Image: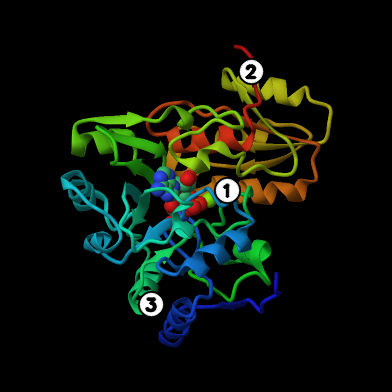
Amino acid sequence: MIKLKTVLVKPSTRVYERAGELLRSGALVAFPTETVYGLGGNALDPEAGKKIYAAKGRPGDNPLIVHISSPEEAESVAYTNEDYYKLAEAFMPGPLTVVLPKKDIVPDSVTGGIKTVAVRCPAHPVARELIRVAGVPIAAPSANLSGSPSPTTADYVMSDLDGRIDMIIDGGQSEIGVESTVVSLTGDVCTVLRPGEVSPRELYAVLGDVAVAEAVKVPSAAGENPESPGMKYKHYAPETPLVLVSGEREAVIAYVNSEKRKKAVLAYSEDAKKYTDAYVIDIGAAEDAHSQMHNLFKALRDVEAAEAEIIYANLPPETDDFLAVYNRMIRACGGEVINAGR
Ligand code: TXA
Ligand code: MG
């Protein structure tokens, strides 16, 4: 791979124009969204699709999300339906991605060869202006190296992708912190393929019927084929092994404190001071799913500084509100859960 000079810039009229030119000419530009940073390329350019996979080191069968500047723009890349517009009305622009049958204009290199396409209309003003100025839909996975946590700041993008892409637009820290909710509208019932800020309960309130794919709650074994191909890979995993501990909070604290190895803990705010001999990162109050979403990926990156032998975190509840946090934690630990009891 040729080493590129990656420029890190703040948004301005000139920057949007330059970024638009880069995208139209087939180059890659990372940009902020309200969920996480995206690694953008022209979604209608087969070569740009290939470059995105190469820059991330991503398996070619894991399709990209196509970002659009208005819900109606989905018409240019996908066959929409009534449910799509109900969801668009309720949640777009915002952190919801919808999988629909794809139109031929979208190259196979963007969808990993499958016959559907995921569309998302982000709410972040920088993302919206970039798509508008570029004048083409933008294919963008999260702007991390494949396998590491999705980046929530421009600096994290730089540390993963320096030399691999042309430009990074710095729009500050991503508000939501975990990737968008991905739903499929290609079957009989709207199915959640990846949980996010928009919860199954909220989708249900709009559509009256919603299913949650099984792969959301269990990391699927290698070789299995979940509907959302991204769900089959170990993801977000810090280099140090992460172990989730279930059970009552005080039991979890006692269990972790009995660990003699050099340890780090991703702790609830209320418990942070109760851990002994540990490098502690506060991920938010126990009941506050939004704070935990916001902090999780940052914590999974920052925890490496501890140079610990093992990292512990509470097993999140499997409730509607915490589904996104639960899903990311389970995948980051590769399924390693210990029960500390009561
Ligand atoms: O919040 C987000 O969605 C961020 C920002 C940048 O928009 N993007 C993002 O993209 O997380 P990525 O590529 O890291 O994750 C896309 C997910 C993967 O799990 C992928 O398998 C799934 O969406 N996906 C994409 N196209 C699909 C399709 N046609 N059918 C099923 N799943 C699809
Ligand atoms: Mg990703």
Residue at the location (35% across, 69% down)? 128
- Asked if residue 294 is positioned above or below residue 107 in the image, the reply reads above
The amino acid beneath tag 3 is Ala
Residue that mark 1 sits on = 297
Question: The residue tagged with tag 3: helix, strand or loop?
Answer: helix
Q: Which mark is residue 180?
A: none
Mark 2: give few (<14), some (14-19) or many (20+) Cα within 10 Å.
some
Numbered disc in front, either 2 or 3: 3
Q: Of callouts 1 and 2, which one flags the residue occurring earlier in the amino acid sequence? A: 2
Numbered disc in front, either 3 or 1: 3
| Image quarter of residue 183 | top left
Farthest residue to the bottom: give it: 14
Residue that mark 2 sits on = 251
The amino acid beneath tag 2 is Ala
Q: Which mark is residue 134?
A: 3
Q: Nearer the viewer, residue 115 or 229?
A: 115
Measure how far apart labels 1 and 2 are at the Cα level: 25 Å
| Image quarter of residue 138 | bottom left
